Image (cartoon, rainbow, N blue to C red):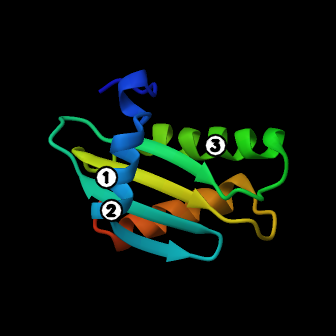
Amino acid sequence: MRKSLTKLEIVKSRLEIDSIFRNGKSFSCSGLRVIVVSNSLEYSRVIVIPVKHYGNSVQRNHIRRQYKEIFRTNKSSINTGFDFAFIVYKGKTASYEEKKDKLISLLNQAGLCQV
């Protein structure tokens, strides 16, 4: 399995995003919500969505990069065949490790991660 995050592994289509929100199952904790829906592909895909009033564009892009990196580094332990939407809420500033722990715990709660 490739360790990089390819273009195929990122959800971009508006129809696919709407499908995730309409049909997905949601798991949340403080500052983060994960919506998961099964896809018929051999790989998992991800989209990171900071809420509208999450700082300025630099901060929103930074948080997107961090969560994509967390997904990329742990994708070997995440079940394949799912679309993930990570919705990031404004709150206290967390370190990279705290964000990673939150995301992994939510994926474990969903039964989609073996870490």
Crowd tier of the residue under label 1, counting other residues whose Cα lies within 10 Å: few below 14, some 14–19, many 20 or above: few
**Left or right side of 24 for 91:** right
Crowd tier of the residue under label 3, counting other residues whose Cα lies within 10 Å: few below 14, some 14–19, many 20 or above: some
User: Which amino acid is tagged 2?
Assistant: Arg
- Per the rendering, the mark at residue 50 is none
* Disc 1 secondary structure class: helix
Judge depth for marks 3 and 1 and give the one in front: 1
Figure label count: 3
User: Which amino acid is tagged 3?
Assistant: Arg
Q: Which residue is mark 3?
A: 64
Q: Nearer the viewer, residue 96 or 52?
A: 52
Q: Which residue is mark 1?
A: 19
User: Which amino acid is tagged 1?
Assistant: Ser
Q: CA distance from mark 3 to mark 1?
A: 20 Å
The reply to whether residue 21 is in sight is yes
Position above or below: 47 against 33: above
Q: Residue at x 66, y 57 (%)?
A: 97
| Residue 29, position as x, y percentages in the image | 55, 76
Q: Residue at x 18, y 36 (%)?
A: 41
Q: Which residue is outermost to the left?
A: 40
Q: For the C terminus, which image quadrant?
A: bottom left
For marks 3 and 2, the one nearer the N-term is 2
Q: Nearer the viewer, residue 23 or 81?
A: 23
The reply to whether residue 45 is in sight is no
Q: Residue at x 28, y 67 (%)?
A: 111
| Residue 82, position as x, y percentages in the image | 27, 49
Crowd tier of the residue under label 2, counting other residues whose Cα lies within 10 Å: few below 14, some 14–19, many 20 or above: few
**Left or right side of 30 for 16:** left
Q: CA distance from mark 2 to mark 1?
A: 5 Å
Q: Which residue is mark 2?
A: 22
User: Do the residues bearing badges 2 and 1 touch, measured as CB atoms within 8 Å?
Assistant: yes
